[in-house]
Amino acid sequence: MLLTMAGFSRTDATPSWPVEMAGYPPIRTKPDGPQEHAVYKGRDGLSTGVHLPIFVRSAVLGSGSSQVAIVALDICTVSIELTDAVRSRLRKETDGDWNNLFLTASHTHSGPDVCGLSTAPDPRTFEFYIDRVTTSVLDAKNSQSTCVVNWAKKSVEGLTVNRRHPERRVNSELTQIVFAEEDSNLVKGVIQSFACHPIIAGAHNTLLFGDYPSVLSISVEKHLGENSVCLFLQGPCGDVNPFAYPYEEKTNITLRAPSGSDTALKIRTVGEAERFGGVLAEVAIEMLKQKNKDKSGNVFATNRQVGLKRRSVEELDAYLFQRDHDPARVKKWLSKELIDTELGAVMLGDLVIVFLPGEPLTAVAEQVGQLVEDSGREALIVGYTNDYPGYVVHPDDYEEVRYENAATVLDREGVSRLMLEAVEIATVN
């Protein structure tokens, strides 16, 4: 039986002022480039209200040198600048080093733009989230108690599709890690993971909303009671889209209702995102009622900084043409041939959570996961963690003229090294 000190917190991080929203920037299409966004329309204007609160949810596991913080944010992406700023603030306020801090974004396309994808980050929003994340982590740390860890996974078929290659499989598993207090057996916290782009609420939506991941987390929390916290960790969904309802028609939502189309106004709504999240929530709640696999072993975490080869200036031109970018970020990309980023892993006995930056595609996660499992561990691959270098495309797929291939700063050699490093840290000890 795996026992660990575990604390959880849920912190409201809803901006009280109109903010830029991330996920649907204006995109330009080159005649000889990817054509997926030829009829695409981005979002105009600032947020006009709130559909569901935007939360920061934190889990702090272990203690002392083995302490690890996992933070789930209802936002689109996390930058290395935000990660470094939170670490710095935590070090000032505590005696920990906080190297094993993993900030993960749900990748909702209806949340606040915290880290500035197309423009420089808004200082007010950026500082607000440094404060909210720091508060959440410290609250979780202060709530620690001894917990028993168990887990389960269940396939939820018929909701998602590989948007690049519909004939290829996608990982449809909902993974659930449960932390129950040793003394009371009450569920203190849950970590859930599923892989699907949270793009059900379309570009016309200007209400802040975490899309289906928020619905899933809030539903599980309501089921368990207000003292329980449910973190959502986004899986490798770089090429995974939701089906449009009714799901049995198996229609990619962006093909049936492209952003900016009249159909999107009817289909890509917050109500449809709630429906999708509700389907997952029903499965998650049913899983909580069942006996899950008890974990045995220890909690161990590792974090590694790596320099990954970037694309040539000529190859980057397609990405820089597609949409506007923060000038400071572009300058940083072009200043040297290696992209400095990081990745990490958290071992819960023989289950390892592998945290990758950017948007991993299914083939990347499958290969990393298989190699990890060949070592005798079971793997859960999570993306959108601690940094955003764009899409993480499998090296074998770099020749395709597709949106994801252009929307990355990583060279195929850089991705190969990222995958190698991920397997190494996930199989250490």
Image (tube, rainbow, N blue to C red):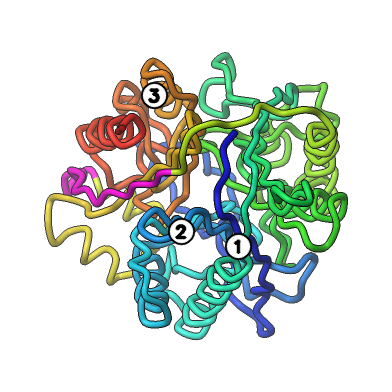
Magenta region's main secondary structure?
strand
Identity of the residue drawn at 37% across and 64% down: 98
Q: Earlier in the sequence, mark 2 or mark 3?
A: 2
Task: Indicate the amino acid at tag 1.
Answer: Gln
Tell me: residue 228, above or below residue 259.
Answer: below
Identity of the residue drawn at 36% across and 34% down: 426
Q: Write down the residue under mark 1.
A: 144
Identity of the residue drawn at 71% across and 57% down: 229
Queried whether the magenta region covers residue 346, the answer comes back as: no
Q: CA distance from mark 2 to mark 3?
A: 26 Å
Which quadrant is the N terminus positioned in? top right
Task: Indicate the amino acid at tag 2.
Answer: Ser
Where are the magenta residues, as a range? 300-315
Q: Position of residue 323 (x, y in %)?
A: 41, 57
Tell me: residue 147, above or below residue 404.
Answer: below
Mark 3 Cα-neighbour bin, 10 Å: few <14, some 14–19, many ≥20: many
Q: Which mark is residue 372?
A: 3
Residue 201 in sight: no
Q: Position of residue 209 (x, y in %)?
A: 72, 62
Q: Residue furthest left?
A: 336
Is disc 1 placed on a helix, strand or loop?
Answer: loop
Tell me: residue 178, above or below residue 420.
Answer: below
Q: Write down the residue under mark 2.
A: 63
Q: CA distance from mark 3 to mark 1?
A: 30 Å
Mark 1 Cα-neighbour bin, 10 Å: few <14, some 14–19, many ≥20: many
Which quadrant is the C terminus positioned in? top left
Task: Indicate the amino acid at tag 3.
Answer: Val
